[in-house]
Amino acid sequence: MSLETPAEHSSSLDKKQVISNIFRELAKVAGHPIFSSDNTKVANHPTEEWLSQIQKNIPPNNGRRVEDVLRDAEEVFSYRIPADHPQFFAFIPSPVSPVSWLGDSLTSAFNVYAGSSVAGSGVCAVEESMVAWIAEQFGLPPSAGGQFVSGASTACLTAFAVARDQRLDGALRQKGIAYISEDTHFCITKALRVIGLLDSQIRTIRCDPTFQMDTNNLRLAISEDIANGLKPFLVVATCGTTGTGAIDPLNEIVDIASEHGLWLHVDAAYGGSVAFSSKHRSLIDGIGRADSIAWDPHKWLFQTYGCGTILFRDKSQALKSFVSSAHFCRDVEDEKEPHNPWNYGIELTRPARHMRLWFSLQVLGMDKIGAMINRGFELAGLAERELRKLPGWVFLAPTSLAILNFRFAPDGVSEVDLNSINSRVSKLLISENVAYILTTCIGGVVGLRMCTINPRTTDDDIRRVARALDHSAQASYRELYETRN
């Protein structure tokens, strides 16, 4: 595959031909379920010498050959923890389908502006169609709308700004109160601070033994704040917590929010993908009653990073917070639809983030996507069954949405020693290139956490990892006590 510079091929026709040639080559990898340049290591870190050298690197005065720069770039990208490795179980961001990668590359190649329906007519029409379809999958009404954003952090920030403007008059902002659970993602608190809330205006509601928001505590907190002359305006429910995969009781929380006139936002960054599985969709019943929903296709719909969505039950509500224009934009505003995409969110300069998802759904189809999501549930079930066969292993939380929390905890061992053993198990598995599994802390004890959403992971992979977990735990247990004796 030859690589030409813009100076060598500057015409529109030549550009299209170059892009066509490149993508013909790239498409050859798209037949694989997941694409990775190196799936041999569960982690690859640079040396201190390499880091020191690269941090001192500055751009050259004279340009270099593309092939030479590509070789350097390949080395830079090789130093990573590959989320697409079949034995990577540490975090939620999913292994990327090569079809998404291909669509993302294609979008970048054309670099279409998605902030104006005049400047980017094609991609804006696709985004509007995609948002309407996604909203329908979540059970939102025809009035719903929204847009694609970089991820849940931006999606939640966008939603909270709208919730504030819809529920709090200017004079009430200092009295506004928002409610989250103790297992709410930390990006929620960051977003609430950005829209102007102080920590004293954020209430953290305890979770019940299944790690769901305790609705009795929520009711009590709201009643107390109202009695104290404050103004509750927002409650944030989670559909798939990062720690345990728990889904808050959405219908109950909606009822409470409606009773008191609160805006209900659902952080469905991870769990929202279940809406695209006909087999498991019932797990998120009630999500369509929310005022706003954040969802990340780059978490469990196999998309490249930077593909998130914010959905509103009533899309027109976002205009109060974001509508704006300028004299130099008058010729790129649609006369039929005066509100361009930039008026429904924070960004003015918007890439066509949705096109990678559109590309993926068109190529793979929903049956394939549903099967890939279902595979995560199957792998989690198998991992739990394998671990329960082994003596000394206990579960710290119910397995939910392909997330497992467990630990090695034989009888007669102190909590301090158990914490040490489980921490060492994680390090051993990584150092021996067996699997990337990290520790967590639930109920004050150290455990291990697995997220099994890679459709490339095989049943045999899971069985091998379960055996390796037990072998490492037993070895760490023996080493600990042999050292003391």
Image (cartoon, helix red, strand yellow):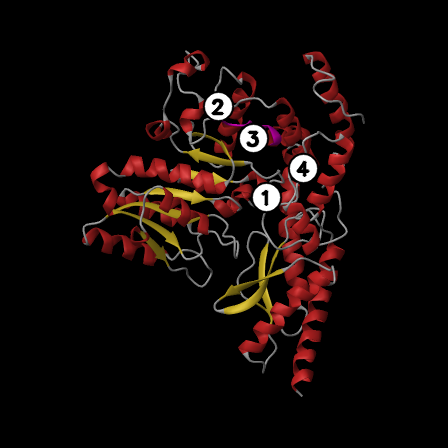
**Residue 432, located in which quarter of the rendered image?**
bottom right
- The residue type indicated by label 3 comes to Arg
Looking at the image, is 439 positioned above or below residue 298?
Answer: below
Q: Label 4: which residue?
A: 368
Q: Earlier in the sequence, mark 2 or mark 4?
A: 2
**Callout 4 touching callout 1 (CB < 8 Å):** no
Label 2: which secondary element: loop
Q: Which mark is in front, 4 or 1?
A: 1
Looking at the image, is 463 positioned above or below residue 75?
Answer: below
Q: Is residue 350 magenta?
A: yes
Q: Label 3: which residue?
A: 353
Q: Earlier in the sequence, mark 1 or mark 3?
A: 1
- The residue type indicated by label 1 comes to Trp
**Callout 4 touching callout 3 (CB < 8 Å):** no
Q: Within 10 Å of the Cα at label 3, are there few (<14), some (14-19), or many (20+) other Cα atoms?
A: many
**Callout 2 touching callout 1 (CB < 8 Å):** no
Label 3: which secondary element: loop
Q: Is residue 216 magenta?
A: no
